[in-house]
Amino acid sequence: MITLKFNFPAVIKSTFLILILVLNTSCAANKFKDSTLINTSHLDFLYEKINVDGKDMGIIHIYSDYPDYKWIGDDDEGIACADDAARAALFYMKYYNLTGDVNSLNKAENLIKFLLYMQAGNGYYYNFIWPDHSINKTFKTSAAEPNWWSWRVILTLSKAYPFFKNKNPDLIKEIELSLNNAVNAAMNWLNEDTVKKYINYGGLKIPAWLPYESAADQSAILLEGLTDYYEIKKDPELLKHINFIAEGILQMQKGDSSEIPYSAFLSWQNTWHAWGNNQASSLLYIGKILNRNDFISSALKEVKYFYPFLIKENYLSAFKVEAENGKNKLIDVEKFSQIAYGIRPDVFACGRAFEITNDKLYLKTSVDIAKWFFGKNAASMKMYDPLTGRCFDGINDNSVINKNSGAESTIEALLTLIALEENPVSKKMLLDYYKENINK
């Protein structure tokens, strides 16, 4: 047997090694693309570890604009907010549970520490911080008050409590103290109106006891957070508030299987809007925990009858409902803008519907909705890129998309995908669709 030996010049050896590296990287990328659509790269880029008064914590930069996608702040608000940090922490906790990724665990922990830092003396949470990491305490979307960002922090901390319970006992003590103060403030605020009164909007009977003049959208986030907190404390007074809010949301459901708006839950007064449309999702979640079949059955109606209508219409942004001669009609219908935050809540609701019913029809609906991210939308454009992890900020009209990729869009897209990939059936359906349409 003759053995041939070759003495390659150093430059050829280097070129050969680089070629191997490129091929390995390419294979890894292909394998990644084939196994998951979740790419945390852009969210990881928006994340920053900071130190405030000797304490490490994490923030999510709010804006990232096309074409270079650098961090961008806002002159009135600041550079990062509790609202985005709370959502990102939820994603990172889910991602750790799904993959065991330790970096995601660390990011979730640091984001929770940031949320704790943002609590005010009244129990609520400020929203934004300035570039020097001081808290923006005065701007209207940052004040520590009973509002969206405070509810979202309560929701995230209530889910973080069982997640970190056996991982970080010291953090758990801080979470529990923060939650106690926040929920007590919320309960005192809710105690101001405990009478079931109604008000008329557009000829519709609307529950007036929901916060902020019948804001079912905000109420749904608060409702889920309070229910998770109830699971920790088992406080019967808290349960009364939970049922009171949930029963108000039930009254926001209008139409039926054949009458518009096809069992949709209105968002505020007689208006429905896609963003933050968490009503069905939250009712399914708490209905399962509290064994309330009335909550579940009402929520399933929205998923079963309203979501197919949205899909058929290529989605809507908002509309109002008016009753005229005993019949509902849609007015002020808006198709745009369409954003990831208007898609994710529906996918969550479908997933929870499947968990309760084991009916795969709901998984199919969830995947059909998620196709919005991959070109099945009014603009026929891909909104999420699995190779970069970026999600565009919105569809402006039939031919124009907003190519910026801020925190909210990025996180809402990733939350949508992880909800689907947690279930192997919906994961396969979405991956198959993506592979079939990747080059279209």
Image: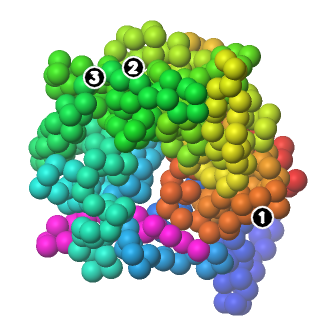
- Select label 3 or label 1 by which is in front: 3
Magenta span includes 113: no
* Residue 113 x %, y %: 23, 57
Q: Residues within 10 Å of mark 3 (few under 14, many from 20)?
A: few
Q: Which residues are magenta?
A: 46-65
Indicate the position of residue 116 as horizontal and vertical percent values.
21, 55
* Front disc: 2 or 3: 3
| Residue 95, horizontal then vertical, whole percent | 45, 45
Please tell me which residue lies in front, 26 or 397: 397
Q: Is residue 166 visible?
A: no
In the displayed structure, 215 sits above or below 66; it is: above
Say which residue label 3 marks: 195
The local crowd at label 1, few if under 14, some if 14 to 19, many if 20 or more residues have their Cα within 10 Å, is few
Q: Which residue is rendered at x = 32% and y = 44% of the image?
A: 151
Alpha carbons under labels 2 and 3: distance apart: 12 Å
Which residue has dot 1 on it? 400
Reading the chain from its start, which is encountered first: label 3 or label 1?
3
List the residue tagged with mark 2. Answer: 247
Q: Which mark is residue 426?
A: none
Does any portion of residue 287 appear in the rendered image? yes
Q: Earlier in the sequence, mark 2 or mark 1?
A: 2
Q: Amino acid at mark 1?
A: Val
